[in-house]
Image (cartoon, grey):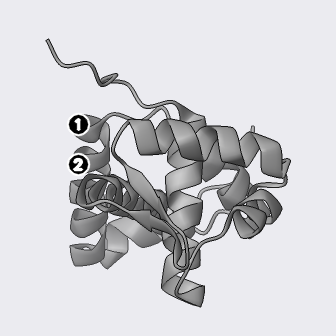
Amino acid sequence: MPDKPVARSSAVEDYLEQILDLINTKGYARVADIAQGLKISQASVTNMVQRLDAEGLLKYEKYRGLVLTTAGETLARNIMRRHQLLTDFLRMLEIEEEVVYHDVEGMEHHISPQTLNAIEALMEALRNNPMVLSSIKHQPHGH
């Protein structure tokens, strides 16, 4: 019986996404940067970092700060890919940017891989059928 939870909480996903983003942009991730990025206290970040360390998703190295393990980085990349795919999909439909941001934040933690794959396939089909995409984009928004 595996002791790791199968369902990742949205908080865990937000942390991993934030950490990978910091590592990609700054080259390192520190507790203070994560706290600032997620707009929460450093104490909360420290608690979550310890939990993620215990789960084998990251390790804390004294001079490098937080380092994602292979498992942590794989999970973080999948989370970022999912976020980007949903963002690209809504932008493709010409949804307003602030709506895109809000909707993606709500959708990204609740969407199944099956639905994500369907959206990816739909996006590909729409790219290959500009007329269909155009007819969808020019529907009046709202009811």
The percent coordinates of residue 139 (x first, y second) are: 59, 57
The percent coordinates of residue 60 (x first, y second) are: 49, 60
Q: How many residues crowd mark 1 within 10 Å: few (<14), some (14–19), many (20+)?
A: few
Mark 1 — residue?
A: 114
Question: How many numbered circles does the render carry?
Answer: 2
* Tag shown at residue 80: none
- SS assignment at label 1: helix
The percent coordinates of residue 14 (x first, y second) are: 58, 49
Residue at the outermost bottom position: 26
Rounded to the nearest angstrom, the CA distance separating label 1 from label 2 is 5 Å
* Tag shown at residue 117: 2
Query: Could you tell me which quadrant the C terminus lies in?
Result: top right
- SS assignment at label 2: helix
The percent coordinates of residue 20 (x first, y second) are: 48, 69
What residue is drawn where x is 49% and y is 83%? Answer: 24
Q: Are marks 1 and 2 in contact (CB under 8 Å)?
A: yes
